[in-house]
Amino acid sequence: LAIVASNVYIFILLPILAQHIEADHTAEARELHLTVKMLCFQVLNAMAVAIAFLFNKIHQDLPQGMFDRGWYVTGGYTVINVLIGDLLAINALVEGGRIFDALIVRKLFAPRAASQATMNRIYAVENPLYLPFRVQLALKFVVYGVAFSFAIPFLYWVLHSSRREYKAACCSHEDQTASTGGPSSD
């Protein structure tokens, strides 16, 4: 619960700090900096817990620092739990349904718009965090896959799936900027 609370706190705080303190010159620079910061925090936060279980086997007569039976029960479970949690909770609920930004605006404000053009603009819901969040989530799966796939071969499939997720995030951002007349990332 503490890890989830810290993640939510960081994800709320980062955009505020980026906009008011860092003041990047372009939206692309802001997105890049947000992606790198969120990725570093996510990876260090979750990997520290999984790797800590390598050296938390003092009371079990097992070798320290080894990916063995003792680690799979604790650290392996943590790795899979983080990935499945991100896959189901983040991708399906937060990003799939966009329950925190798009759903509220679409249900409350779009039906009351004065014109169809205004309704379309409200319904589109431009979120400056959408691309950095999606890219850092896909890269988190890549880092986890590279770091732990030798211990958990299932993560090779995760690497393949995250490659598709990364392509989908980048393609949807390019389509969105092209349709709004914004700068393309070609």
Image (cartoon, rainbow, N blue to C red):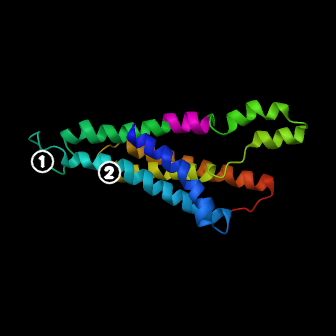
Q: In the displayed structure, does residue 68 sit left or right of residue 141?
A: left
Label disc, if present, on residue 183 of the rendered structure: none
Q: In the displayed structure, does residue 100 sit left or right of residue 69?
A: right
Q: Residue 93 is drawn in which quadrant?
A: top right
Q: In the displayed structure, does residue 4 sit left or right of residue 15?
A: left
Q: Which residue is mark 1?
A: 63
**Image location (x, y in percent) of residue 82:** 40, 40
Instruction: Name the residue at 69% across, 33% down.
Output: 104
In which quadrant is the N terminus drawn? top left
Q: Residue 100 is drawn in which quadrant?
A: top right
**Image location (x, y in percent) of residue 24:** 63, 67
Instruction: Name the residue at 78% across, 34% down.
Output: 109
Amino acid type assigned to the residue bearing label 1 in the image: Pro
User: Would you place residue 140 above or below residue 73 in this image?
Assistant: below
Could one spot residue 98 in this view of the protein? yes
Q: Earlier in the sequence, mark 1 or mark 2?
A: 2
Q: Which residue is mark 2?
A: 48
Q: In the displayed structure, does residue 139 sit left or right of residue 126?
A: left
Amino acid type assigned to the residue bearing label 2 in the image: Ala
